[in-house]
Amino acid sequence: MRKKTLLKAVGGGVVLMLVQVLLIGAYVKPARAVEPIKIGVILPFTGPMADYGPLGKDGIKFRLDEANYKVAGKPIKLIIEDGATDTSMSLQKAKKLVEVDKVKVIIGPIHSGVATGLAPYFVEKKVIDIGLMDHPLEITKFGSVLLYPGTLYSVGVPLGWYAYDKLGYRKITTLGADYVAGYRFVGGTIDMFKERGGTLIAKQWAPFGTADFGPYLPSLKKADAVVIWTIAGDLARFLRQYREFGLKMPVLIPEAAALRSANMEEIGDFIAGVVGCLDYTWRIDNPSNKRFVAGFEGKFGRKPDRDHANSYTATSIVLAALEATKGDTTYEKLKQAILGLRMETPQGPLSFTPSGIAITNRYICEARVVKGAYVWDPIYIYSDVRDPRE
């Protein structure tokens, strides 16, 4: 009898414990999953600038790999869209990122015209946009687009200084692409050269896709140097025809990053001795760039170009700002965090003006052969370059 009573007591205790466990479980809510911080990207994978998309994507993902896709203790979700270098399509993709994916910060687009077209939408929706290439100064009036690495005009500014101060040139002639980037790149060089006391002999503009520069070459007046900028394929044709025509004036390129490693190899000896201004070359000698180049080469088996470095740094800007806000993506907090950044990048020191334009180093480089391949080799550094019109 006592044995049965004991068994009942034990059994009753077990049942009571099970009931208590079930009741506790009913009141304990499962831990909520941490919402990821979403970073949107608009790059061209189709259209006239389709070759830029994969390069930008590699630089962005490489930086996020370094961060293990986490920032401020939160996971990162990367959402990449193809804008096809088309304003209408890029706007559709921007709306999808903002209104469907609920993204608060976007990297890209690359093309300055497309970026200008999207700027009113970004400011309306309180979305931060980080550039990947230089944009017009006028875009800063919208407030939502932060210009990295700078403005179109500021690209050519150091080359004007260098041509007059260091090379001793007093007369230049120019040939530029007949659209806004050509006007600004070449214009920055011309204005600074003239401001120093130099003389512009003549200037010409050629449309994109010029197959034959022969008609322009006789009009390149005798000067100390010729300043040229257009897209990579046109630059390659110009340099070949220029040398074949027997012209000897030194060639200066305000935005020489247009010629990547592959373009330089294609041009070959025609590019030897050309001097250009760049925001990035893998030959930059600083600790941050050495780490970047070693890591990139280890992952991809090649040296990085400007497009890899710019997308890597743009992503670093976003990550640094999110760390500063502890993951808060509120428009004003994130914008102020970016404007307050002081950071080291592969390009060198980076900060921003109050209007959101990056202050960076610019490198005067010469096209030289290094280990059997043509590269842009730095020969002079201009620190903390900004748009003098700001």
Image (cartoon, rainbow, N blue to C red):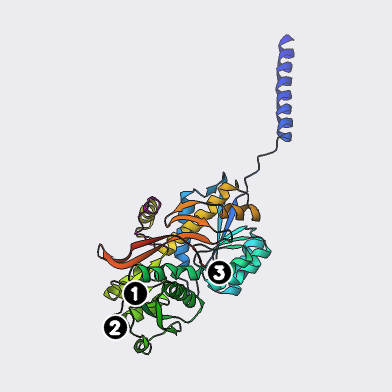
Tell me which segment is drawn in magenta: 279-290
Q: Secondary structure beneath disc 1?
A: loop
Residue 255 lies in the magenta-colored region: no
The residue to which callout 3 is attached is 137
- Mark 1 belongs to which amino acid? Tyr
Q: From the viewer's perspective, is the residue at label 1 or at label 2 nearer?
A: 1
Query: Residue 199 or 105: which is nearer the viewer?
Result: 199
Mark 1 / mark 2, whichever is N-terminal: 1
Residue at 31%, 80% (x, y): give it. 240
Marks 1 and 3, Cα distance to the nearest angstrom?
A: 28 Å
10 sits left or right of 213 in the view: right
Residues tagged 1 and 3 counted as in contact (Cβ below 8 A): no
- Mark 3 belongs to which amino acid? Leu
Percent of width and height locating residue 204: 43, 84
Q: From the viewer's perspective, is the residue at label 1 or at label 3 nearer?
A: 1
- Mark 2 belongs to which amino acid? Leu
Q: Quadrant of residue 16?
A: top right
The residue to which callout 2 is attached is 247
Q: Quadrant of residue 293?
A: bottom left
Mark 1 / mark 3, whichever is N-terminal: 3
Percent of width and height locating residue 140: 59, 66
The residue to which callout 1 is attached is 169
